[in-house]
Amino acid sequence: MHIAFFDSGVGGLTVLHEAIQCMPGERFIYFGDSRNAPYGTKSREQITGLVLQACAFLEEKKLKALVIACNTATSVAIQAVRDRYDFPVIGMEPAVKPAVEGSSDKRVLVCATDLTLKEDKLDKLVQGLHAEDQVDYLSLQGLVLLAEHFEMNAPETDAYLRDRFSGIAWDAYHAIVLGCTHFIYFREHIRRLIPPHVRIINGNKGTISNLISRINQESSFEKKEIQYFISGQKADTGHFEKYLDYLNNTQTQQL
Ligand code: DGL
């Protein structure tokens, strides 16, 4: 039995990367729907259709769990997936809770895709935490395709981030939430552009703890095994592994 990770493209590899470190004896499948990325600019109906199509493909692989390693897909399609399948389906949402809990009197900047920011699910999450007066929102949708094109260090990336961050009075904030799995590739870059007192928070660790609590872990496989698919077709391992290598090489403890 496999644990599948699904995303609109390469973003979910940042979550798989976390899983590989915590769950060495598991067999993984990674499905990146890169031919249809980005999701964040599509309609709810389009995204739900694409997610269900991917799930129909993954179901054939006999899953012990599915991680929807995409905040955007989770916000619109997780219920439809849970209604159809018996295996545990783990979703993601922007890590607003740890961000507001760590707060004193300063604000939290939640960054996500256009669609995640428009959805009621995020409003409900913030209202449930009584944090409406503490949170601001910023779309960093442009980072999704920059990550798909492996342009983490391109001049366009720097120009894009500087433009999106211009005008933000960082003294008013104590944390920034990376509420899209593609954004994790830009942590270092973001770290260099914002003051050190602003913490950079993401939900990947929480998602993997949630996954671990939902399954029986196996340790019978000595070697990690990952099968990769792009939009339903077997993918070249190197294409995805260069992203995992990038994460290994840029990981920092203190962000
Ligand atoms: N990785 C995705 C997320 O976590 C979606 C990016 C996109 O395709 O727009 O929201």
Image (spheres, helix red, strand yellow):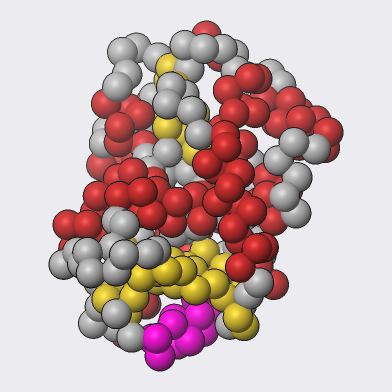
Task: Tell me if residue 179 can be seen.
Answer: yes
The residue closer to the viewer here, 212 or 41, is 212
Q: Quadrant of residue 94?
A: top left
The spot of residue 84 in percent (x, y) is 32, 85
Q: Is residue 207 magenta?
A: no
Task: Tell me if residue 121 can be seen.
Answer: no
Q: Quadrant of residue 158?
A: top right
Residue in the picture at 23% in, 69% down: 220
Q: Is residue 57 magenta?
A: yes
Q: Please, what is the dominant secondary structure of the magenta stretch?
A: helix
Instruction: Give the left or right position of residue 24, taking residue 235 as reference.
Output: left
Q: Is residue 71 above or below residue 228?
A: above
The spot of residue 15 in percent (x, y) is 43, 52
The residue closer to the viewer here, 24 or 41, is 24
Instruction: Give the left or right position of residue 164, taking residue 177 as reference.
Output: right
Instruction: Give the left or right position of residue 185, taking residue 208 as reference.
Output: right
Q: Is residue 121 above or below residue 143?
A: below
Instruction: Give the left or right position of residue 112, taking residue 80 as reference.
Output: right
Which portion, as a residue range, is magenta? Answer: 50-61
Image label count: 0
The residue closer to the viewer here, 111 or 65, is 65
Residue in the picture at 48% in, 28% down: 252
Residue furthest bottom in the image = 60
Residue in the picture at 55% in, 43% down: 247
Residue in the picture at 57% in, 34% down: 250
The spot of residue 127 in percent (x, y) is 31, 40
The spot of residue 40 in percent (x, y) is 60, 58
